[in-house]
Image (spheres, rainbow, N blue to C red):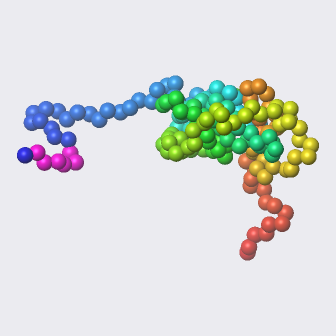
Amino acid sequence: MKVLSGQIPVKVGSKPKKPVVKVQDPADSIPPELLLRRDKSIRYERNGAVYATDGKVGVLKKVVVDEGAGEVAELIVAVDNGERLVLLPPDLVDKTAGSAVFLTINRVQFAERAASAVEYVKRHFARADVKALLKHEGRPASSNPRRAVADVGRDYVETPNPSPLDRLQRRSDAFAAD
């Protein structure tokens, strides 16, 4: 009769096997020259690599914009481990460097989000009017300046990237309690 336990059975006289350590593929690691780089704007480029905090997780395929508000609404990312195209919010983006997009979450968190994310269906979206996106007249101020479209082209969309110091500045009407 066999009894189940939490230990791996070891034959008498044999050496225990060493645990297998999965080595990260060098192609999935974050290039060091991009880690220190911080662009002045957030630039979403078609077919740019998408990195979590601990390695590559996908490729940016498209950017969904709200023409009326002139804002980036969603990112369409091809997940590395399959053929799925999923929609992710742009609020997950920390910075961009060249064509690379860096997220604020790690691979495990990305996998969880991607598993529950809405899949991209082409017929649910229409091509954006580039000229309409570049017109800023009559458009209300964006509630989230990091999402506001500053420049757009055939293969890229740019939004401003406010300085991290801007987030730390106090508003003139805010007071600290003593």
* Residue 154 horizontal side relative to residue 120, left or right: right
- Front residue (pair 129, 94): 129
User: Is 115 positioned to the left or the right of 144 in the image?
Assistant: left
Seen as rendered, the residue at the extreme left is 1
**104 or 90: nearer the eye?**
90
Q: Is residue 111 above or below residue 130?
A: below
The span shown in magenta is 2-7
Dividing the picture into quadrants, the one containing residue 79 is: top right
Check the image and name the residue furthest to the bottom.
178
- The answer to whether 49 is drawn above or below residue 173 in the figure is above
Seen at 78% across and 52% down, the residue is: 143
Residue 6, image x, y percentages = 22, 48
Quadrant hosting residue 58: top right
Q: Which part of the image, by quadrant, shows the C terminus?
A: bottom right
Seen at 49% across and 30% down, the residue is 82
Report the predominant secondary structure element of the magenta stretch. loop
Between residues 67 and 43, which one lies in front from this camera angle? 67
Whether residue 9 is in magenta: the answer is no
Residue 174 in percent (x, y) is at: 80, 66
User: Residue 158 in the image: x percent, y percent?
Assistant: 77, 35
Residue 161 makes an appearance in the image: no
* Residue 4 inside the magenta-drawn segment: yes
Point 17% across, 48% down: residue: 4
Q: Is residue 72 left or right of residue 117?
A: right
